[in-house]
């Protein structure tokens, strides 16, 4: 006995979604299945057009993408259940991923192109400005040259006239010297000697082979100054370009990942409170209860037993602190108050602190305190991603436990620091 069954199934699903990048994504999946069953055997033929997706991006430039996949499946099982169409969520995910990727790529290209065009325009204007100044200097030199030549020619002509007059007088005097009429000699000599050289002639000092040499020297000095200035500015420009991050990497989750960003820190003796002693190459601080012979310094904390590190951090950094007793682990802007009562870590908007105090944790910023739960440990890990505005505190033992994470915007480099509560409390920067 054979049984013949013919089944035709048609499924159409339409999904409409709007992506994060303000892109309209339309996904249509179409499946057409034809199955022929001859009991006890079955033959199944499926033709699938899925996914059929049309993506329209509502951007200044309209982009349309169309993808079609065709699959043919032939099977002869005793029993067959096969679906060649992706689920709606998968289709939506693919569309969103494609839309976000295209939008991000286009946005990056537009930003880079805009920066290139702006830079090109600015440098073109700078070159034109230098060329204008060069033309002005040339015109100034030519004008001064013309004026000096005209003045020199006038003086030369005046000198020629004076020389001619002197030669004429010299000739007459020579002739007069040969006369034997003494009365005529005295009368003529008096008239000849009354002719005087013009007193309007200035004294002339000529500097051969120099003339405009001082101008060349001044222009050369200007070139050297511009080159030095451009070198300094080029360093700033290249640094600004290199720190551009389109997609920030995810925050590390394991200690191994965190250690990739480990940094070596040292404590700054010029910031240490007078009751704090530094040791271990300025990596360890101890509250001694005795005044240390530190010299006066404007960076020193006077109202709190605190100390800052030398290094200002502005990238991704991770460090660990081994503590005994009650210790505050913090980061702070450099311009935190050193003498005021609001200069304690966490008491102002310039510092963020984790207080490890009496068997508990508290996070404090801008004098707002938050109780933090987590396993007790003598070691605290700190991860900073300055650009992402992320500051994370960890309890470090056999395992890593996130105690508290801060998400904000940092406007200055951050300096790690410590505050100690009681006698013989210590905090030491761990060599990683």
Image (cartoon, rainbow, N blue to C red):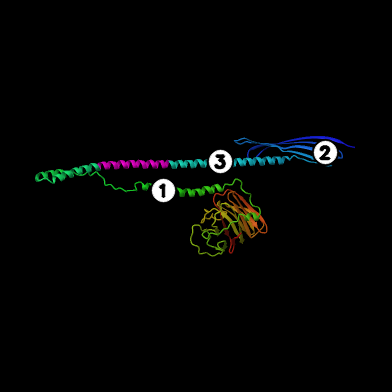
The residue located at (81%, 38%) in the rendering is: 44
Is 72 positioned to the left or the right of 232 in the image?
A: right
- Which residue occupies the foreground of this view, 215 or 276? 215
370 magenta-colored:
no
Nearest the eye: 417 or 429? 429
156 inside magenta stretch: yes
- The tag on residue 113 is 3
Say the numbered circle drawn on residue 220: 1
Sequence order check, earlier mark of 2 and 1: 2
Identify which residue is drawn at 49% across, 41% down: 122
Dot 2 lies on which element? strand
Q: Quadrant of the N terminus?
A: top right
Q: Nearer the viewer, mark 2 or mark 3?
A: 2
User: Residue at the spot x=57%, y=41% of the render?
Assistant: 111
Disc 1 packing (10 Å; few <14; some 14–19; many ≥20): few
**Image disc number at residue 43:** 2
Residue 317 percent across, percent down from the top left? 59, 54
Q: Are there few (<14), some (14-19), or many (20+) residues within 10 Å of tag 3?
A: few
| Quarter where residue 189 is shown | top left
User: How far, Cα to Cα, is label 2 from label 1?
Assistant: 91 Å
**Is residue 372 something one can see in this rendering?**
no
Q: Secondary structure at mark 1?
A: helix
């Amino acid at each position: 006995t054979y049984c013949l069954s013919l089944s035709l199934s048609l499924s159409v699903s339409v999904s409409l979604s709007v992506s994060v990048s303000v892109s309209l994504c339309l996904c249509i999946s179409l499946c057409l299945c034809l199955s022929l069953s001859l009991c006890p055997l079955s033959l199944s033929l499926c033709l699938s057009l899925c996914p059929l997706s049309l993506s329209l991006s509502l951007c200044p430039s309209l982009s349309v993408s169309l993808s079609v996949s065709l699959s043919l499946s032939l099977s002869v099982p005793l029993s067959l259940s096969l679906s060649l169409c992706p689920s709606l969520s998968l289709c939506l995910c693919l569309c969103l991923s494609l839309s976000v990727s295209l939008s991000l790529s286009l946005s990056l290209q537009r930003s880079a192109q805009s920066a290139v065009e702006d830079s090109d325009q600015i440098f073109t204007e700078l070159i034109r400005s230098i060329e204008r100044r060069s033309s002005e200097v040339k015109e100034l030199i030519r004008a001064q040259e013309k004026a000096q030549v005209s003045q020199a020619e006038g003086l030369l002509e005046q000198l020629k006239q004076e020389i001619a007059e002197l030669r004429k007088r010299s000739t007459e005097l020579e002739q007069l010297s040969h006369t034997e009429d003494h009365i005529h000699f005295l009368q003529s000599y008096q008239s000849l000697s009354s002719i005087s050289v013009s007193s309007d002639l200035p004294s002339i000092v000529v500097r051969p082979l120099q003339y405009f040499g001082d101008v060349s020297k001044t222009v050369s000095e200007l070139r050297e100054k511009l080159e030095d200035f451009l070198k300094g500015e080029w360093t700033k420009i290249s640094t600004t370009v290199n720190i551009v991050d389109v997609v920030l990497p995810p925050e590390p989750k394991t200690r191994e990942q965190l250690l990739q960003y480990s940094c070596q820190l040292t404590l700054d003796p010029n910031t240490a409170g007078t009751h704090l002693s530094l040791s271990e190459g300025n990596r360890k601080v101890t509250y001694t209860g005795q005044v240390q012979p530190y010299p006066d310094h404007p960076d020193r904390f006077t109202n709190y037993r605190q100390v800052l590190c030398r290094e200002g951090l502005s990238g991704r950094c991770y460090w660990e602190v081994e503590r005994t007793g009650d210790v505050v682990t913090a980061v702070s802007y450099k311009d935190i108050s050193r003498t005021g009562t609001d200069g304690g870590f966490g008491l102002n908007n310039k510092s963020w602190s984790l207080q490890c105090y009496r068997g508990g944790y508290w996070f404090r910023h801008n004098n707002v305190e938050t109780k933090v739960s987590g396993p007790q440990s003598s070691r605290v890990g700190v991860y900073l991603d300055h650009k992402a505005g992320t500051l994370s505190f960890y309890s470090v033992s056999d395992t890593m436990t996130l105690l508290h994470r801060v998400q904000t915007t940092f406007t200055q480099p951050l300096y790690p620091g410590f505050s100690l509560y009681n006698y013989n409390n210590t905090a030491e920067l761990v060599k990683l």
